Amino acid sequence: MAFCFKRKESVPKAIRRLGCERVEHALECLKHCRGGEAIHCARKDIKKMRALLRLVRAEIRRKEFRLLTKPLWKAAKFLAAPRDAHVKTKTLINLVGHFKGQLATGALRHFRSELRNAFDQEMMRFAKEKTANAVHRLLRRVGKELEQLEISGKGWKALSPGVKAAYADGIRAYQRSCKNPSAENFHLWRKHAKELWYQVLLLRRVWPEQMDAMAEELETLGENLGEDHDLVMLQETAREMYAACHLPELKALIGLIDERQHELRSAATTIGARFYAEKPSAFCKRLAGYWRIWCREKKPFDSLVEAT
């Protein structure tokens, strides 16, 4: 189930196929949902569907767009609490590993235990409230809507407005983060970077070498911004606990989080300065050229047949 366009497939057909594939994959992730990774997997599929729909938003009737995006938003919201609890535990492990030796052995044992208990409680609530069933119903509804989705445009004309908008949104979010480096601004930038990353993955086959390089840069940017957001959540929890018990190791942890965030934000802005150097129109025109050449190309096998 490669998340990318096929050469001989129309854009409307590809959007329907790719969307339905993500629905089925998300449902498969949730079928035997016992841990945070399954929920994280389903949320990634929902984000891919959102990026897919935003890519052709200009070619979908407003009512149909809402019928698809509203249940996706609800499904993601249902999955947010257990996902966040799972990520906090992983983020702490990664942070301690990054600053290996700067915290005493056994430090943060109580904090780790609190994070694990919080995750267990969220998973119990998720199962008890039958949230997975609610998400299942929402995704099934999206799948049915996707099967009947009408997209008016064809070829690159259907994709161009979405690509241009995603890149332009990323530029604005990058510039806003540079001027005002708040957690909210970096988080918004991450959303736009991830959206464009998914759209670049969709276009991978038009020129694998070029698109892979672009996707790799966007993936690194998204990982830096994503880890920054995860650290924001972890720090909020650490501050709440420190206010209650004033453990010195928690104060040290908060300081390490600040240090790591500085590293991540510096790396992200360095990538952003390079990646967003083009104007949106130039970026879109460049990808349009790749697309048109790809659509005119003949497969190697076809060329061999004609030569014989």
Image (cartoon, rainbow, N blue to C red):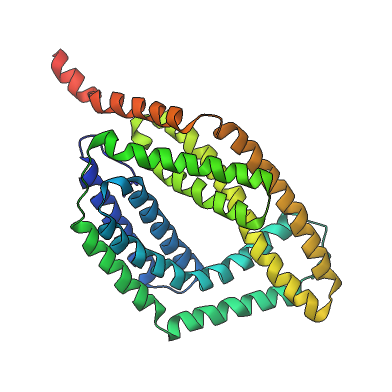
**Furthest residue to the right?**
248
Q: Residue at x 68, y 49 (%)?
A: 180
Q: Quadrant of residue 179?
A: top right
**Furthest residue to the top?**
307
Q: Residue at x 41, y 37 (%)?
A: 164
Q: Quadrant of residue 210?
A: top left
- Give the x, y percent position of residue 25: 33, 60
Q: Residue at x 32, y 39 (%)?
A: 159
Residues 62 and 153: in front is 62
Q: Is residue 259 visible?
A: yes
- Give the x, y percent position of residue 7: 24, 34
For residue 196, side relative to residue 224 (left or right): left
Q: Quadrant of residue 235?
A: bottom right
Residues 157 and 262: in front is 157
Q: How many marks?
A: 0
- Give the x, y percent position of residue 242: 79, 75
Residues 74 and 135: in front is 74
Q: Is residue 200 visible?
A: no
- Give the x, y percent position of residue 148: 18, 57
Picture quarter with the C terminus: top left
Q: Residue at x 25, y 59 (%)?
A: 64
Q: Is 222 located above or below residue 8 in the figure?
A: below
